[in-house]
Amino acid sequence: MRNLPILLVLAAGTTLAGCTTLATPSAPVDVTRFHLVGADGQIARGTIAVGPVTNAPADSQSFEFRSYAAAVAAELARIGYTPVAEGAATDFLARVDYTRGTQTADGDGGPGRTQRQVRTQLSVAIEHRADAAVVWEGRADMAADAGADPAEVTRRANKLAAALFKGFPGESGRTITVP
């Protein structure tokens, strides 16, 4: 029963991800990752809780944060971790943070035409619960047209999380662009 809330969030995120595949923002995602792999070139798997960074903003219970946390939990499950409720005894913790802001970019219509874009960055750090050592961390960054509806939050979260964990653990220290 303790895992029910996280399972509901995972189910909702997975359901929404399946429903919105065609509407995913088309902007490319820049991804950078750093990690400490074992002698076998892999990172150990096990149970993992997904939660905010230590100094989390007050909105860590908001719809937006929960959307990013659910997207990260779904990707962690896909790559072999077993997500459990935050606060449960786990092998690992996934610390999630995101930032979002608007910027102005040159438009395609010639000089003087600009368009507003939303720049979003998703950051995740996976740490051993026993000693808080970070074994993997990464960030995914994307710019998309401003003015999106609330469903865009879920699509953006799913796209950023999928790009971040694509080819996990990825090449350490290298920035790649995921279409």
Image (cartoon, helix red, strand yellow):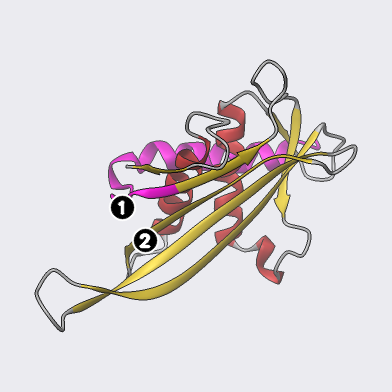
Q: In which quarter of the image is the N terminus?
A: top right
Number of residues whose C-alpha sits closer than 10 Å to that of mark 1, classed few (under 14), some (14–19) or many (20 or more): some
Q: In this view of the protein, which residue sits in the foreground, 167 or 77?
A: 167
Q: In this view of the protein, which residue sits in the foreground, 49 or 36?
A: 36
Relative side of 133 to 32, left or right: right
- Helix or strand or loop: what does disc 1 sit on? loop
- Residue 125, x across and y down, in percent: 68, 46
- Residue 60, x across and y down, in percent: 68, 62
The Cα atoms of the two marked residues, 2 and 1, are separated by: 6 Å
Q: In this view of the protein, which residue sits in the foreground, 50 or 169?
A: 169
Image disc number at residue 143: 2
- Residue 94, x across and y down, in percent: 70, 43
Q: Which residue lies furthest to the top in this view?
A: 40
- Residue at label 1? 27
**Where are the magenta residues, as a range?**
1-30
Number of residues whose C-alpha sits closer than 10 Å to that of mark 2, classed few (under 14), some (14–19) or many (20 or more): many
Is residue 168 shown in magenta? no
Residue type at the position of mark 2: Ala
Please give the name of the residue rendered at 73% of the width and 64% of the height, measured from the top-left corner: 56
- Residue 132, x across and y down, in percent: 84, 44
- Helix or strand or loop: what does disc 2 sit on? strand
Rendered position, 114 above or below 41: below
Query: Which of marks 1 and 2 precedes in the sequence?
Result: 1
Is residue 19 shown in magenta? yes
Rendered position, 30 above or below 107: above
